Image (tube, rainbow, N blue to C red):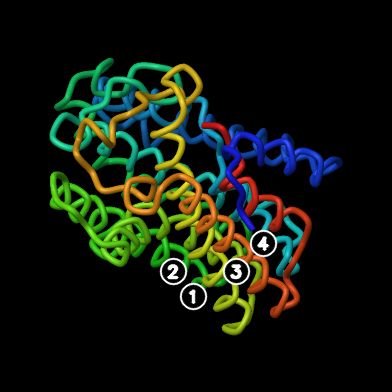
Amino acid sequence: MADSHSLTSRADVVDREVEGIDLAADRASVDRELRALCKGEALSALPAPVAEAIRYSILGQGKRLRPILMLAAYRACGGEQDASAVAACIEVVHAYSLVHDDLPCMDDDDMRRGSPTTHRVHGVAIATAAGVVMVPLAVRAACDAGERLGLPKASQAAIVRELMRASGGGGMVGGQLLDLEGEGSSLSIDQLERIHSAKTGALISASARIGGIAAGASTVVLDALTEYGNAIGLAFQIADDVLDATSTTAALGKTAGRDVELRKSTYPMLLGVDRAIARAASLVDDACAALERAGLRTATLEMLARYAIARTS
């Protein structure tokens, strides 16, 4: 159960629980694939300003949570090869979403990951074009990565479908639209969860499923990964809302207090900070229970679920 302490206090608990679990190698392998993609033929064929904006957004200092989650799910399902190139495609889609989310017509933010946002560096038009290009770039890279991994065509197609479902009208795009429409309105918890399950949760859930698909998991296992991903995706967004309300710009690496400025309904606003934290913790427990029922509960997948609400940025 959650208590009245901040999310920051939970980070200490997670640090103690996961001693010995080192994800640095996974992050390094994903970063290696992202650098290779940014040096590859696909970007060199683009207009230079757009290519530079894509490199700027992809190679920023992100947490790489989604691709690392994909790799953890892949291994939990029996995958034994290096699936980092597939995982990197997920980060490309995530980076696209951040570029567009920060635009003046969206959340109009100046900082991301401690650096100026893409449109502040490269201009609104170039940033908008870069975000659009990153979606087919991710698809092309996913197909190439699937070939490298030796996946059947059906599995390659399923991975692309997951990426597009998560980034499209039923996922991030639709969630962003609902989020914009909700500014200045008093939303219910059900409405808020619908928005964030699409805007934030869809790609996190897809990351877990893609790991299972790449490993050849059964439908039953994929369903468990979906339940796990849906739960931690929503928990992740609740933590974001709490951090926006309680942390600082320096600690977050992006502008704190934007939800209030944009007059958005948030979990702390509707539930209060303590109850919002309790809701997030309950979702993490649900996620781990879904893994347990399917025999997928690994130390890394559990740690990633708990990290979703223990992080400080």
Residue plotted at (26% across, 34% down) = 260
Q: Are marks 4 and 2 in contact (CB under 8 Å)?
A: no
Q: How much space separates mark 4 and mark 3, taking CA atoms?
A: 20 Å
Q: Label 4, secondary structure: give it.
A: helix
User: Is 9 in front, or is 229?
Assistant: 9
Of pointers 4 and 3, the one earlier in the residue sequence: 4
Q: How much space separates mark 3 and mark 1, taking CA atoms?
A: 31 Å
Left or right of 94? Residue 229 is right
Left or right of 16? Residue 164 is left
Q: Label 1, secondary structure: give it.
A: helix
Classed neighbour count for the residue bearing mark 1: other residues with Cα under 10 Å, few (<14), some (14–19), many (≥20): few
Q: Nearer the viewer, mark 3 or mark 1?
A: 3
Q: Which mark is residue 157?
A: 2
Q: Are marks 2 and 1 in contact (CB under 8 Å)?
A: yes
Q: Which residue corresponds to mark 3? A: 286
Q: Nearer the viewer, mark 4 or mark 3?
A: 3
Residue 223 x %, y %: 55, 78
Classed neighbour count for the residue bearing mark 2: other residues with Cα under 10 Å, few (<14), some (14–19), many (≥20): some
Q: Nearer the viewer, mark 4 or mark 2?
A: 4
Q: Which residue corresponds to mark 1? A: 154
Residue plotted at (74% across, 53% down) = 300
Residue 159 x %, y %: 47, 64
Residue plotted at (23% across, 62% down) = 169
Q: How much space separates mark 2 and mark 1, taking CA atoms?
A: 5 Å
Q: Amino acid at mark 3?
A: Asp
Q: Which mark is residue 74?
A: 4
Q: Amino acid at mark 2?
A: Ala
User: Is 312 in front, or is 90?
Assistant: 312
- On screen, residue 37 above or below 288: above
